[in-house]
Image (cartoon, grey):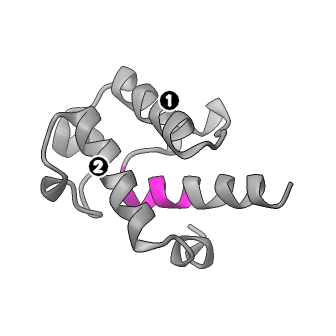
Amino acid sequence: MSGNLVNEISPELRTRIREIVADVLEVSAEEVQEQHSFVEDFDADSLLIIEMFSRFEKQLGIEIPQEELVDLDDLGTAYELIARHATAVANV
């Protein structure tokens, strides 16, 4: 995981990401912590992971390659993916 990119995510964006994840998982944002696995702790299946991806793209205005779906299992990974692709969009 590239810590430098993750460190660049603002607290506001972290909150938005957490809220999107919580909404998809149908839990409160407070229940979703960085150490929690979406699959192990919240029984998220592949359809829920796809829904998270879709909402990240639509609500945050970024594109994430489909092959990176397999990496998404916790908030830390979500932060990293979004930071990497938000940076790529900003650099275009």
Residue situated furthest top in the rendering: 47
Quadrant assignment, res 40: top left
Q: Determine if the magenta segment contains residue 79.
A: yes
Q: Determine if the magenta segment contains residue 73.
A: no
Horizontally, is 17 left or right of 39 in the view? Answer: right
**Residue drawn at 76 percent across, 59 percent down:** 90
Q: Amino acid at mark 1?
A: Ser
Residue 9, which numbered label?
none
Q: Main secondary structure of the magenta part?
A: helix
The local crowd at label 2, few if under 14, some if 14 to 19, many if 20 or more residues have their Cα within 10 Å, is some
The local crowd at label 1, few if under 14, some if 14 to 19, many if 20 or more residues have their Cα within 10 Å, is some
Residue placed under numbered mark 1 in the picture: 54
Residue 19, which numbered label?
2
Residue situated furthest right in the rendering: 92
Of the numbered discs 2 and 1, the one sitting upstream in the chain is 2
The residue stretch that appears in magenta: 74-80
Instruction: Name the residue nearer the viewer: 48 or 1.
Output: 48
| Position of 49 relative to 47 (above/below) | below
Callout 2: helix, strand or loop?
helix
Measure the C-alpha gap from mark 2 to mark 1.
Answer: 14 Å
